[in-house]
Amino acid sequence: MESGFGSGFGADFGSGGGSGGKLDPGLIMEQVKVQIAVANAQELLQRMTDKCFRKCIGKPGGALDNSEQKCIAMCMDRYMDAWNTVSRAYNSRLQRERANM
């Protein structure tokens, strides 16, 4: 998974897009935002995997049985629902605070 995310950033980062070696702050900021979003998505996936594995898999084996599959699916759904709820509340609060400045 990691090989697909973020590939190509190293070659393009700060190249200025052919503008004579000058750095484009807007381009750099966009690339940083994308890298942060990718890192956040990877962290979310890793945490969700760790928590749901510990919760649902009693004795790791060669395959998941039916109850483990259901547990994993439900755990991941609940984790994503909670993440989305917290994210919406956080973004809403940030927007209110920015409006009050």
Image: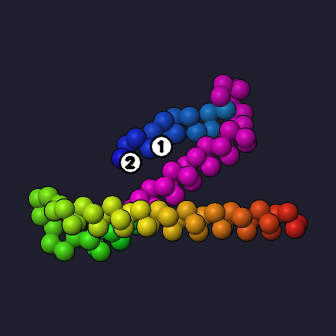
Observer able to see residue 49: no
Q: In this view of the protein, which residue sits in the foreground, 10 or 29?
A: 29
User: Which residue, given by chain and number where applicable, does mark 1 sit on?
Assistant: 6
Q: Which residues are magenta?
A: 17-46
Q: Going 80% across and 66% down the picture, which residue do you hit?
A: 96
Picture quarter with the C terminus: bottom right
- What's under tag 2, amino acid-wise? Glu
Residue 32 point in image, percent of width and height: 61, 48
Q: In this view of the protein, which residue sits in the foreground, 36 or 77?
A: 77
Q: Secondary structure at mark 1?
A: loop
Q: Going 65% across and 28% down the picture, which residue do you hit?
A: 17
Left or right? Give the position of 96 relative to 44.
right
Q: CA distance from mark 2 to mark 1?
A: 8 Å
* Residue that extends furthest to the right in the rendered view of this protein: 101
Q: In this view of the protein, which residue sits in the foreground, 29 or 10?
A: 29
Q: Going 52% across and 39% down the picture, which residue do you hit?
A: 9
Q: How is the image coloured?
A: rainbow
User: Which residue, given by chain and number where applicable, does mark 2 sit on?
Assistant: 2
